Image (cartoon, rainbow, N blue to C red):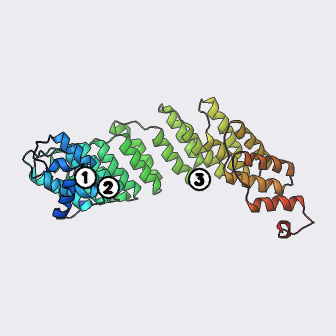
């Protein structure tokens, strides 16, 4: 898959995503207006006194989401009405809270028709966020992005990246690719964040080779990869069992002046422990400290899982002691696996310490754990069922 910009489209990218659509503007009811006229927060809109645009915005800020359409219909008939981006931002935000997305469509079309209000990228970023995050309407978010130039407003790379991330998060990777290729049509200069989002999408769908190609493209786009870039690719490598290749990427990372952090090392430690290479994981823990990168709970937890998976229960017990000395709390599952393992090896003295450690951090051992302990304490005197009768 190639990811360089394409400058030879025969159709606009907007047509790749959408067809035409016509909606209508809903009207307010007189009964609703009567109620609003008597409400203390909105009654000023019904007086004949002159209102500044700032005052109107303040009133709309206090209005109920379901009432803003009726209020907008009323205030637009006032002689002192001056439409503004601030007012429309409040109205659209309120409509988003009311989940009235069709009304948002209508207002945008009204603004475009009347051409009496200039809108900024911030305005459209808010609209797109409402469509995407509140409504889950990814298609409307894309449509709004490509419709921005018709309002004499071009999207910033921040707005472009938000839509790109929406597509990746919803696993619409082909659409994300098309959007990336269309950046030049929107006069958007992609940045490191754009490429990071693209790499995230490629790694999520298992296209590691393509992700590496995008990594090579950073200099051509005037960008530099960062920790997130490398960590995302390394995670994909480790998920595919390519742990050694992930270590090779760390070397490239350092050569390019990017220092690995705890997240980077945690990915590598996790990859090692999943392959049963727990000794190497413990060595990496020490290397972290030498590089001035302090391991966090996630690092220790991955090493502990590796020890438990390798049935090294006495080593795991000592490692839990080390974690507790650093005020780190192992997971409940770690305690459970450790108790079961120590019971299998008849190390009941160690089981007692682990149970006390578990209780000291607020964990309550479950019945199956007590049953296993008692079975080991009284192996021939009772059956498992009669121990609790």
Q: CA distance from mark 1 to mark 3?
A: 48 Å
Horizontal and vertical percent for residue 359? 74, 48
* Residue closer to the observer: 160 or 296: 296
The nearer-to-camera label among 3 and 2 is: 2
Residue identified by numbered label 2: 97
Extreme residue in the left direction: 79
Q: Residues within 10 Å of mark 1 (few under 14, many from 20)?
A: many
**Residue at position x 74%, y 55% in the image:** 365
Q: Residues within 10 Å of mark 2 (few under 14, many from 20)?
A: some
Query: Left or right of 70: which side holds 228?
Result: right
Say whether marks 1 and 3 touch (CB < 8 Å).
no
**Residue at position x 33%, y 55% in the image:** 132
Q: CA distance from mark 3 to mark 2?
A: 45 Å
Camera sees residue 141: no
Q: Earlier in the sequence, mark 3 or mark 2?
A: 2
* Residue closer to the observer: 202 or 362: 362
Rendered-image quadrant of the C terminus? bottom right
Q: CA distance from mark 2 to mark 1?
A: 9 Å
Q: Quadrant of residue 107?
A: bottom left
Residue identified by numbered label 1: 92
Position of residue 203 relative to residue 17, above or below, is above
């Amino acid at each position: 898959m190639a990811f360089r910009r394409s400058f030879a489209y025969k159709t606009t990218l907007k047509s790749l995503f959408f067809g035409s659509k016509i909606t209508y503007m809903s009207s307010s009811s007189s009964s609703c207006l009567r109620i609003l006229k008597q409400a203390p927060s909105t009654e000023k809109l019904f007086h004949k006194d002159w209102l500044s645009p700032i005052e109107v915005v303040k009133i709309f800020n206090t209005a109920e989401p379901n009432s803003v359409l009726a209020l907008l219909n009323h205030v637009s008939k006032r002689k002192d009405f001056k439409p503004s981006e601030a007012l429309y931002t409040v109205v659209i935000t309120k409509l988003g809270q009311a989940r009235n997305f069709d009304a948002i469509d209508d207002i945008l079309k009204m603004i475009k028709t009347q051409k009496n209000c200039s809108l900024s990228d911030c305005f459209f970023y808010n609209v797109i966020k409402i469509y995407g995050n509140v409504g889950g309407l990814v298609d409307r978010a894309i449509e709004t992005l490509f419709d921005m130039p018709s309002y004499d407003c071009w999207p910033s790379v921040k707005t472009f990246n938000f839509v790109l991330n929406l597509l990746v998060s919803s696993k619409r990777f082909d659409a994300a690719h098309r959007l990336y290729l269309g950046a030049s049509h929107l006069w958007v200069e992609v940045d490191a964040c754009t490429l990071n989002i693209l790499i995230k999408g490629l790694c999520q769908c298992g296209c590691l080779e393509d992700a590496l190609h995008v990594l090579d493209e950073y200099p051509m786009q005037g960008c530099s990869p960062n920790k997130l870039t490398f960590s995302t690719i390394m995670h994909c490598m480790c998920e595919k069992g390519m742990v050694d290749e992930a270590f090779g990427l760390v070397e490239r990372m350092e050569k390019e002046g990017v220092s690995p952090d705890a997240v980077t090392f945690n990915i590598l430690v996790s990859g090692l422990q999943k392959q049963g290479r727990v000794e190497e994981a413990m060595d990496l823990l020490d290397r972290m400290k030498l590089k001035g990168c302090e391991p966090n709970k996630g690092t220790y937890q991955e090493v502990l899982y590796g020890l438990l998976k390798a049935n090294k229960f006495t080593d795991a017990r000592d490692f839990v002691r080390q974690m507790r000395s650093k005020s780190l709390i192992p997971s409940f599952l770690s305690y459970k696996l450790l108790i079961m393992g120590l019971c299998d090896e008849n190390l009941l003295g160690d089981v007692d310490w682990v149970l006390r450690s578990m209780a000291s951090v607020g964990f309550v051992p479950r019945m199956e754990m007590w049953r296993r302990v008692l079975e080991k304490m009284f192996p021939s005197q009772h059956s498992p069922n009669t121990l609790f009768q």
